Image (cartoon, grey):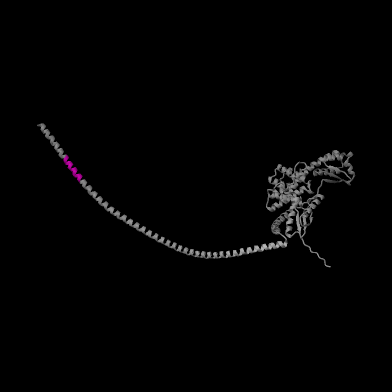
Amino acid sequence: MELLIAAVGVLLVALIGLVAVWGLWRRARVASARLVANAEKEAQQVFARAEIEGQRLQKDAEIQVRERLLAARTEFERETREHRLQLSGTERELETRENELSGRIESLDEREQTLAQGEADFADRDAKLHAMEEELERATAEQRVRLERIAGLTADQAKAELMRAMENEARIDAASAMKRIEDEANEKAKDKARRVIAMAVQRIASEHVVESTVSVVDLPSDEMKGRIIGREGRNIRAFEQATGVDLIVDDTPEAVILSCFEPVRREIARLALGALIQDGRIHPGRIEELVAKIQAEMEEKLVTDGEAAALEAGIPDLHPELHKLLGRLQFRSSFGQNALKHSLEVSWLAHHMAAELGADAAVAKRAGLLHDLGKAVDREMDGTHLELGRELLRKHGESDVVIHAMECHHGDYDPHSVEAVLVTAADALSAARPGARREILENYIKRLEKLESMATEFKGVGKAYAIQAGRELRVVVESDRVSDEEALWLARDVAKKVESELTYPGQIKVTVIRETRAVEYAR
């Protein structure tokens, strides 16, 4: 029973539990249905709202599309109008150009017609000229035959004669043109050259002395000759041995002669002999003493004179040895022209010409002063004065430009600077001016005779005269053999022959004279 009650209780409890579970399930179902209904309702509301918003957005999009289409249509219409306007302008331009081209075509047609007419006229003229040429050839041939018959010349001979005539005519024309060009060039160049040289020459004035290889010493009386000779000639032997100078005692009254090719030794001997005569004590011991003293004084004098010359030229920075060498130049001469005075003259001439031409006046002046420095030692050393001078200047620190200007003054080297050319010109100007140098009379006469004979060798020359100490050659031609134009060529040919075959200082002017004289006597 208890078990049954327990079983029933259990069943009741299970039944109650089932009822409770069913109730809970039903509530949950109802709640779920309610939630589904609510969700569907909300979904319908959201859908409705979305549909409304979509319709609105669609309307907005349609409006925007319409606006864009309208704007695009408006822009298209505007661009279309602009293009139409441009096309209209282009059409007008094309029409204008077409009209112009039409006008040009018409003009070209007219020109073509004119050219065609000109070609036709030219063809007619060409035909006429051809006929005239044939007629001229026939006439020329007839004339040639007639001339050959009259003149007795063949065609080749006549051609040769014509060629000679044309050659002479060409030479005459060339001579005239050459003379005109030379006159124009010389007129310009001579003015400049004259001004430069004149200014340079006018600024210097030097005294010029003539020196030789002998010196004459005056004596107070002829009795002094015996004292100079000494017993058995011992004094004269001692003097010659000490000085290296020949002492000539001849019949010249109250004078003796010192002879020596070396001017410094000759000057020392002259001073020593003068001192001995003044002192009165003449014997070998006194002679050696005085000669040694004079030699020492001479060394100092050479340096002093060289310094004075350098200062006179405005060049105080020379090496002391160069001063001494410059001092020796005063005892050296060339064709009677004192070497030191010549160097100073060249220095100033080169300086002034360089200043006028805008060159380096300092270099020109320095090179002019030192250009003959080698002559101070060329008698004691082997070599030309150019080579010796170059070595001396290089040894004592002179610049290359000065050395180059110095070594070019005789034409042994090609000048590469304006200063070198100016030193050469100044040297020639100083040496060639009237009175600067003297020559042996025989050589001078031979040179003049040679100069005249060279001119008389040319065809048509009657006489030739060398005047102005050989600085001008006057050539008198025969007027019937030489024309005026041929005289120009003759002057040039004579000048070229003189340049190539004759050695002379400076320049020689060649003047060709042609004149016609008619002589008649009134009786």
Q: What segment is highlighted magenta in the picture?
A: 21-33
Q: Is 245 on the left or on the right of 80, as rendered?
A: right
Q: Nearer the viewer, residue 281 or 337?
A: 337
Where does the C terminus fall, quadrant-wise?
Answer: bottom right
Depth order, front residue of 298/445: 445
Q: Which residue is drawn at 20% across and 46% down?
A: 34
Q: Position of residue 184 (x, y in %)?
A: 69, 58
Q: In this view, does 75 lie to the left or right of 156?
A: left
Q: Residue furthest bottom?
A: 523
Q: Is residue 376 visible?
A: yes
Residue 471 in view of the camera: no
Residue 377 on image: x %, y %: 76, 43
* Quarter that holds the N terminus: top left
Q: Is residue 26 magenta?
A: yes
Q: In this view, does 196 lie to the left or right of 64?
A: right
254 or 88: nearer the eye? 88
* Quarter residue 69 falls in: bottom left
Q: In the rendered image, which quarter is residue 258 located in? A: top right
Which residue: 30% across, 55% down?
Answer: 59
